[in-house]
Image (cartoon, rainbow, N blue to C red):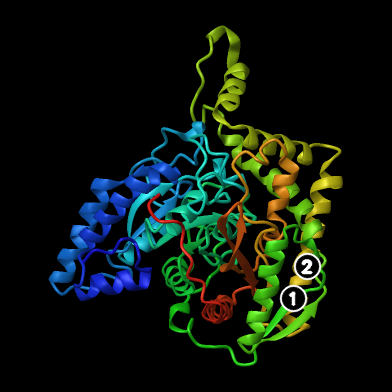
Amino acid sequence: MKTDGSMTMAQAAGAVASGRTDAEGLVAEALDRTRAIGSYLNCVLQLLDEDALARARAVDQKRNAGEPIGPLGGVPIILKDNIVLDRGRTTCASKMLERYESPFSATVAKKLEAAGAIVIAKANLDEFAMGSSGENSAFGPARNPWDPTRVPGGSSSGSAVSVAARIVPGALGSDTGGSIRQPASHCGVVGLKPTYGRVSRYGLVAFASSLDQIGPITRTVEDAAIMLDAISGHDPHDSTSLNLSPTSCAQTVSRPIEGLRVAVPAGVIDEIAHNGVRTVYQDAINACRSAGAEIVEVALPVFKSGIAAYYLICAAEASSNLARFDGVRYGSRASVAPSQGLEAMYKESRSSGFGPEVQRRIMLGTHVLSSGYYDAYYLTAARARRLIKEAFDAVFRSHGCHVLLTPAAPEPAFRIGEKSDDPLTMYLEDLFTVPANLAGVPAITVPAGVVIEGGVALPVGVQFHAAALQEDTLLRAARMFEREVGFDAQPPAGL
């Protein structure tokens, strides 16, 4: 049974379980698509061919023997290359780690494999997950399958491209300030950031530890629920992991929410720079209303303050987390003459190992944490973070809203290189996504429409948020929206 990448995760799992297709054939086709399309789009850094095919054959053998194969038995997936695996390399798309081989697998990888999923590759990303476009990889930018001259968004660029290009039906990304949701919007797929602590971070190479969260990128909301159920739950290896059982969202995702109340921030539409995106967002509000939801306008003036607070906090934490990559404790060591001394080796290792964006954030974070500036910058940002959390709490408690609807990005995918020399403008690409990370609440991007630029259709997503730990409500609302909008556009064929 040929699939040509058209099946969702739920469909692929069902086809393998029923024997309508073999896991080995499913994985082989995904590997073929990766070679044919993935190299052109530069979305994959490493294929795990032999290992993936061997695991697929093992799934087929178990199924044929009448043994359980798991809810994702035989489904090919891709991991963002900052999630470690006990085979192959984990590079974080950085020269600093280009030869690193992890001795263990991340908890999320183990859980997905326990559910039967098969990791076929590691995905490209912005170096150490620092970026909003997918251009900051040491191994070249990933390309948007809708228009390869444009960015796919970042930092989970390769994961989003792999799903949008129908290479695999699902992938994992990480989200520190929108790194799952923003590329999902630019690539026309679904991206879910769970509540902070809902999913283990053990085995995720840290960027900003108080903000990072792993989540799924999929074609449908149902698939996002299936992946969340597989990767969620308490992990004693992660001190920030909440003592909760795995979710069971796949069982309820298709149930409508009676009396759904959708919050819309007052004035947010004026923050959207692009006319086409503004139209899609207004259409999304109308679609929610058509689906039976009550639209509630709320005050939530946190977007611009959120950007400022986020880039101070994440840079400070990045500076601390990346201090270990010095060529001695971790990372590639530069060759310098012994007479130059240890300090020269440190300096050369970090200068040659880290790209410009990572260096920029390390320097900013070191400055923010330095004596005389810590109170003025870092503590002020921490106080702003608390106010943002309280503002989100008020939306869900005081106003009694189930979800909050915002844009996912201020504009559609822009051209590669267009903003490379203007980091401040690039940072504003995260305007609508960073508040969810600062507040620690779950959020999901769902495709909502397309805009036409230069004769090319580019997808645009919208973003739903829910109160902390309310992934079930979030996914049900997103599924209602998905059904109402009926987005079924695909990237151009024959890339």
Looking at this view, name the residue that lies furthest to the front: 455
**Number of marks in the rendered image:** 2
x 13%, y 70%: residue: 64
Left or right side of 491 for 315: right
Residue type (three-letter) at the residue carrying disc 1:
Val
- Asked whether 96 or 120 is in front, the reply is 120
Q: Position of residue 264 (x, y in %)?
A: 74, 75
What crowding class fits label 2: few (fewer than 14 Cα within 10 Å), some (14-19), or many (20 or more)? some
Q: Are marks 1 and 2 in contact (CB under 8 Å)?
A: yes
At horizontal 71% and vertical 40% (from top left) the residue drawn is: 423
Rendered residue at 81%/57% (across/down) = 305
Estimate the x, y position of residue 258 in percent, counting from the top left: 60, 92
Could you tell whether 352 is left or right of 389 in the image?
left
Amino acid type of the residue that numbered disc 2 sits on in the rendered structure: Val
Label 1's element?
strand
Closer to us: 145 or 225 = 145
Q: Which mark is residue 264?
A: 1
Extreme residue in the bottom direction: 258
